[in-house]
Amino acid sequence: MFALLQAADVEFSYGAVPVLRGVSMDVPAGGFVGILGPNGSGKTTLLKVLAGTLRPARGRVTVDGMNIRNIPRRDVARRMAVVPQETHLTFDYSVLEVVLMGRYPHLGTFQIEGPDDIAIAREALDATGTRNFEDRQFATLSGGEKQRVIIAAALAQVTRGAGTTGALLLLDEPTAALDLAYQIEIAALLRDLQQRTPIAIAVSTHDLNFAAAVCRTLVLLSEGRVLAAGPTAEVLTPVNIRQLYGVDADVHQHEAAGHLVVVPVARVRPGAYG
Amino acid sequence: MQPVRRRIAFVLAGFGAIAAIAVALAPLVGSTAIHLGRAFDRSIPFGDNVDAQILFVARLPRTLAGALVGAALATAGVVFQGLLRNPLATPFTLGVSSGAALGAMLAITFGWGLGIAGISGVAAASFAGAAGAVAIVYALARARHGGLSTNVLLLAGVTLNAFFSALILFVQFFADFTDVYRMLRWLVGDLDVASYQPLAASLPLLLVSFAFFAWLARPLNLLSLGPDSAEAHGIDVRTAQRVAFFSASLATGAAVSVAGPIGFVGIVIPHLVRLLVGADHRVVLPASALFGAAFLVGCDLLGRILMPPIEIPVGVITALIGGPFFLWLLMKRG
Amino acid sequence: MRIVAAVLMLLVYSFGAGAQQPQQRPPQRIISIIPALTEILFAIGAGPRVVAVGSFDDYPPEVKKLERVGALLDPNLERILALKPDLVTVYGSQTDLQRQLERAGVPMFLYRHARLADVSATILELGKRAGQPQEAEALTKSIERHLDRIRQRVAGRPRPRTLVVFGREALALRGVYASGGHGFLHDMLTAAGGDNIFADVQRESVQATSELILARRPDVVIELRVGDTTPEQRLKEIEVWNRLSSVPAVQAKRVFFLTDARTVVPGPRVAEGTELIARALHPDAFK
């Protein structure tokens, strides 16, 4: 499989503080990549660099082999959508209006969305189980419902013609602000989406179990560098977890859940590696 | 909710009708009774036709000024609120009006006249003051790492307002007593332009602003999601912010030079319109323009007929209406 | 014993001087921050005893050499007290300044801007306080006589409907302020043989919107703007009125631009100011 989205030796600093010190990773077509790491490891920054929102000081990001900086913003937006951790709207838009905003990259300067766009938006709402919220004000929804609507908007954004072929969804800490129930819901939704549509997904998260539940490949980020990358089962090991989080953990396949599960056991003294 | 196309059509028709009625009716009403038949009687030379002069020299330019200024302030308010992502922003939040006020104060104190028929020196000076304030705020806001942080913009604007207000007090202190009174009077707005020249001068500026506003409608929707989200939706956030800042400042500067800093239009109308038609800027902008026009023409009308022959300044009327409206809004939310 | 008596007398004298006694001597160090009162003081012969004036005082020419201590909005209390005055003219509205001067024990003359008739009363009162009662009386008599002469000259002539403008924006017909039916401008106009178009407005000033001016159709417009203006500037200012071409004053070319300070100071030269206005209204009465 060729890499749909690829970062090569990306370096980024906020002012004088280096955050990414040469990160390389890729998101294959149809892949489900998790970017894992503790707070401050640079996960969100990496995601923004991948999305093209931030420009790396060194290295480059490519989409289908082409440098993202050479692709017009709108064209990038038609293939790649970002779901932020939380969405706060300044004004009271309805759910449908929010999802329709995902269609803007597909419209001409003064073009107004047509019936096709509305149909795509509605399908996206269906896909995330939020169709019945269509006319409600976005601000009145619960956290989980809002997140699902934003995912629907992202889906609508990357739907072209026949569907979401070659499309990318980037999610930043999708479960961080959610209750347990919603966490499971989002995980299920993402898995489900992946199976139904040919969409590539990359999530940044510090939630090991969530990553284990949904991601097929992982990139472990430690202090701006890639600690390990590869299939989940290979990468999510107690050794790596100890190195990444300073925590002794037990990792095993959970029968009922159907995926790897990580149980932290004890804190390791800082600096002690196994 | 109706699709956007239909809502825009509804707004144009509905609010358009209200604005048209206001503009058509206002020149016919006033503290003096005029005879319409005589006003339109072509056989009387214009120089002798009092009714015609009251209609076409006193009232019509005034009504048109009210419509233009009302539309400008209302839409500028919408754009500033979208730019700063703050529903409490007004066209005057970023210092445009205090710059204009300083220019006007100086012109009044030193008796600057422009000498171009119909365009007063005060108007020109206030526009220059507004432009100066905008330049300073922009320079301050972009000094920080090349971007255009809305927080810094807000801080810069508030700081500039405070500083210019201090300068204004300074100028007033050294001015003649009648000049001080006239300055205070300018601050509450005056639509009595009595000439079509100021309208002709400000119209191109306003049309340019309105054109940019039309382009900004979708970017402003996206900016509501946050600048990163907006960027991820494919718009150039920095360009959109700059266009929003300059075009809204242009509209505000032009409006304030014509009629002084009339308050409350730029915040009451956007809120009211959003309550009526939703938050999509493609609908809110035209609705605010038309409703703002009707509103200001109506307020000016009230000011002219409530206590004849004394005229209550239009800014006082907008404040008397806008203040309680705001209170009601606050209580509704809380 | 004599020493005790001397000390006692000294004590009595100093007590007496500190008490609130009516002054026997007329004030020797007068400060006047009000232009009209300054003019009066000089006109009644108290000029040599004036030690400081206000920022806007410029008549008679002698005041230009005197120190300035501020005016209505910015009186310089420190400076005023440092000059040790024994009479200070104060605006009725300057309550802060009054309080402070009272605390410092400085005698004051309170002034309220009023009507033409009050000018004489003010001159007499100030004359008494400044110790020039006879000169004050003579001055008021001469002003009254002058005003009577003016009234006689214009009596019986048709009184033109007049708009008296005392302020507006330069070179534009905006922010036009005119005299209402109250106040000394109105009174001067009446004495000069004109009828104020805003006589019905019970205020000193009216904002004359273009509609009002058109509706009230003044026969004459008198603009008062004190200051240096070149003839070209004056012409340009008058041309501004051409926009309201249906106004009789514009059609008959009876828009006058008066820059003489005598028209706006309710002081000793008020009759001269009134005559200037009368000459504009009734030129043929003064041939």
Image: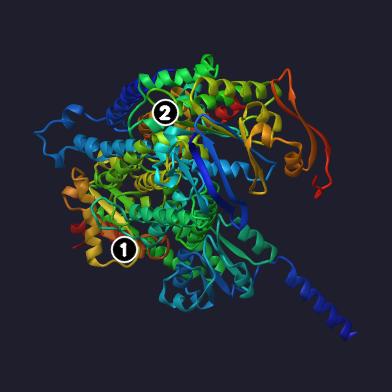
Distance CA(mark 1)–CA(mark 2): 69 Å
Q: Residue at x 39, y 22 (%)?
A: A162
Residue that mark 1 sits on: C259
Query: Which quarter of the image is occupied by the C terminus of chain B?
Result: top right
Q: Position of residue C42 (x, y in %)?
A: 46, 72
Characterize the local packing of mark 2: few (<14), some (14-19) or many (20 or more) Cα atoms within 10 angstroms: many
Confirm or deny contact between disc 1 and disc 2 (CB under 8 A): no
Label 2 SS: loop
Which residue is nearer to you in this view: C174 or C84?
C174
Q: Position of residue C20 (x, y in %)?
A: 71, 65
Q: Is residue B231 visible?
A: yes
- Badge 1 amino acid: Thr
Which of pointers 1 and 2 indicates the residue nearer the eye?
2
Amino acid type indicated by mark 2: Arg
Which quarter of the rendered picture does the N terminus of chain B lie within? Answer: top left
Q: Is residue A185 left or right of residue B145?
A: right
Q: Position of residue C207 (x, y in %)?
A: 37, 45
Task: Say above or below: B187 vs A34.
Answer: below
- For residue A112, what is the image quadrant? top left
Viewer can see residue B87: no
Report in which chain the residue with disc 1 lies.
C
Residue at x 42% of width, y 50% of height:
C183
Q: Tag on residue A103? A: 2
Q: Is residue B55 left or right of residue C189?
A: left
B293 vs B174: above or below:
above
Q: Secondary structure at mark 1?
A: loop
> A160 or C24, which lies in front?
A160
